[in-house]
Amino acid sequence: MRRKNFRATTYAVVVLAVMFSSLESSQARDYRVRKKTGGLTFDVRINRNPPVLGDNEIRIAIKDAQGNPVKGLRVFVNYYMPPMPGMPPMNYNIPAKAENTEYRATMDLIMTGPWNIVLRLKYRGRMMKIVFPIDVR
Ligand SMILES: [Cu+2]
């Protein structure tokens, strides 16, 4: 797997890709995941598709069973690479900031390959967890 010092090359490729796809909306480029649990619907977007080395912004919209945005939660984003032989653990936990009807955070993904994303929050006294894998390029 490539390490972070290949980041400049990755950026150059991304810049070119963006130039050639400038007619697409930014939404079309988002990496999207929808999950439901405990009566809530989570619409998750990552602003890189596929997710890339370096900073990736994650936005989480949470709606109740009536479709109303759920505000005022404390949402935490945990992102980690499964343990691999010969690699230091890569496991990060950051709070998401509430912004309008969404929660936002920036993940610094420091290696290509498989990562897991775990969103954690408490809703009406219950701990909730959403988990999904991503493949960082
Ligand atoms: Cu690894």
Image: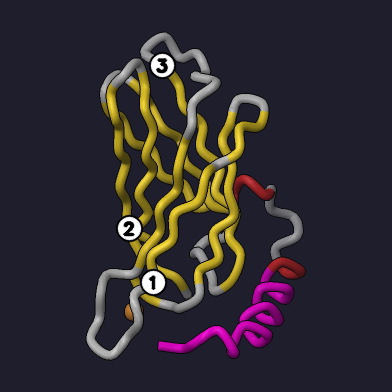
Residue at 41% from the left image edge and 16% from the top image edge: 64
Q: Is residue 61 above or below residue 131?
A: above
Ligand 1: image quarter: bottom left
What amino acid type should be assigned to the residue bearing mark 1?
Met
Give the class, few, some or many, for how many residues have Cα within 10 Å of label 2's Cα (few <14, many ≥20). some
Q: Nearer the viewer, residue 39 or 72?
A: 72
Q: Which residue is mark 1?
A: 90
Q: Nearer the viewer, residue 28 or 51?
A: 51
SS type, badge 1: loop
Q: Is residue 5 magenta?
A: yes
Q: Quadrant of residue 80?
A: bottom left
Which residue corresponds to the image point at 36% horizontal and 27% vertical from the top-left? 122
Q: Which residue is mark 3?
A: 64
Q: Amino acid at mark 3?
A: Asp
Residue 54 vs 128, above or below: the answer is below
- What are the residue bounds of the magenta stretch? 1-17
Q: Residue at left 60%, top 38%?
A: 97
**Left or right of 87 in this view: 11:** right
State left or right for residue 1 relative to residue 29: left
Q: CA distance from mark 2 to mark 3?
A: 24 Å
Ligand 1 within 8 angstroms of badge 3 C-beta: no
Disc 3 is placed on an element classified as loop
Crowd around label 1: few <14 · some 14–19 · many ≥20 (10 Å) = some
Give how far across and how far down residue 75 sits, in percent: 47, 36
Q: Is mark 1 within 8 Å of ligand 1?
A: yes
Residue at label 2? 133
SS category of the residue bearing label 2: strand
Disc 2 residue type (three-letter): Pro
Which numbered disc, 1 or 3, marks the residue that appears first in the sequence? 3
Give me the disc on residue 32.
none
| x and y, in percent, of residue 87 in the image | 32, 85
